[in-house]
Amino acid sequence: MRRLAAKYLYTLTSPEPIVNGFVELDIDGSVIRTGVSEEPSLEEEWYDGALVPGFVNAHCHVELSYLKGMFRKGSGMAGFIDQINALRDTTTRERKIAAIREQMNKMWDAGVSAMADISNCDDSFAIKSGHPIYTRTFLEVFGTEPEDCPAIIADVRALNAKAKSFDLDAAPTPHACYTMSPELLTAASIDGLKSGFLSFHSEESPEEEEMLISGSGPMWENRKAAGMSTPPVTGEISLKYFLGRLLAALETPVDGNVLLVHEVCLNEYGVSIARRILAHPFIAICPRSNMFIHNALPPIGLMRESGIPICVGTDSLSSNDSLDMVSELLCLQENFSDVPLGEMLIWACRNGAEFLDKRTILGSIEPGKRPGIVLIDGLSQDGRLTDASASRRLV
């Protein structure tokens, strides 16, 4: 048995910490019990910080780790897409795989226990299959031309079969409304939802909304200049368009855990239709990525009021300086100071585990679970994050 104690213990059964709390663990890392450390003993490991369960990185593109430091900030979504197209295949497969392994190990050491990861190829499969981080892999598809839909679906099904050969939990998923024909958006969603899960880049930027609402703006011009078909101009928010493509083939409420990633432009109307059409909606926020690309942040107040579970992701090293979950929480704290640390940790741990359907194992420190135990140090006197805060895995 191992007993860990700290100034704050966040079990995440509620947002409030146990002050001077302890957690006892079995040899396999299973939680035995938690409580208040009344009289510390020699057998107790004491830490000046906060003990929290392992994080769940709810949105990552770990296969893009080789792109670290190569992108200019503040380009807007159209400029970011131009950069990704220009830089995506500028190194060898061996270097890509080495970068994936390095970042997976860094995330593990910093306390990430599970991840919802986006893949466009098989570069990460072998590493994920033997790694202690649990990963659900979303095999992302693109394609703006309707006639290409059958071939794209055939290709992603073949990639899915390869992922299964590595014993990975994986399934197709659509990318975003602006990179897909209506036919492909529906087909990829149907295929993905057979697994019970879907991840979708939604309302990431005002430029995306301009495309659907008025057929204008930088992304519209970007697509037209590239000779690509553009999504239909609906006069409505892009989230409604996405949900409409689901309803083209499925009944309300659409079953399965559906993760709406980014939602920088979410409004009350979007919340209402998402709650009405989706049986189990989730939102993944990636604040530092949003700041990196277009210096914007999602409407956290509206999200908190919506009742839709919020999760936290890092996105990729093409749009972020690191894949560090504590840095994401610090960004949120700096911009939304009214949100308590315990609530943000629920987003970063418990809600992500619920999305991945791993809540019986991960996400909170409760008897019988094996969430991993992580120390966050460098806290202020009142228990808030600071620039010196960092996380490291203890269990």
Image (cartoon, rainbow, N blue to C red):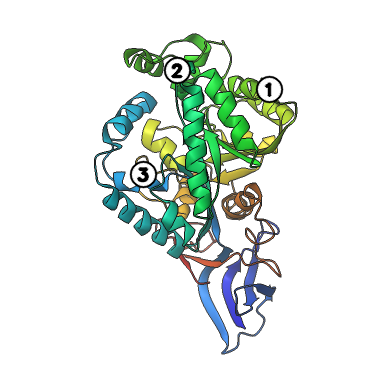
Q: Which residue is denoted by mark 1 in the rendering?
A: 247
Figure label count: 3
Between the residue at mark 1 and the residue at mark 2, the CA separation in whole angstroms equals 21 Å
Q: Which residue is denoted by mark 3 in the rendering?
A: 64
The crowd level at tag 2 (other Cα within 10 Å; few <14, some 14-19, many 20+) is some
Between the residue at mark 3 and the residue at mark 2, the CA separation in whole angstroms equals 25 Å
Amino acid on which the number 2 mark rests in the picture: Glu
183 up-or-down from 288: above or below: above
Of the image marks 1 and 2, the number of the one nearer the N terminus? 2
Q: Residue drawn at (63%, 60%), measured in percent from left and top? A: 362
Of the image marks 3 and 2, the number of the one nearer the N terminus? 3
Amino acid on which the number 1 mark rests in the picture: Leu
Amino acid on which the number 3 mark rests in the picture: Leu
- Residue 261 in picture, x, y percent from top left: 53, 36
CB contact under 8 Å: marks 3 and 2: no
On residue 329, the disc is none
Please indicate whether residue 100 sits to the left or right of residue 269 in the image. left
Question: In which quadrant will I find the N terminus?
Answer: bottom right
Residue closer to the observer: 298 or 236: 236
- Residue 368 in picture, x, y percent from top left: 70, 69
On residue 145, the disc is 2
- Residue 260 in picture, x, y percent from top left: 58, 35
Q: Secondary structure at mark 1?
A: helix
- Residue 63 in picture, x, y percent from top left: 38, 46
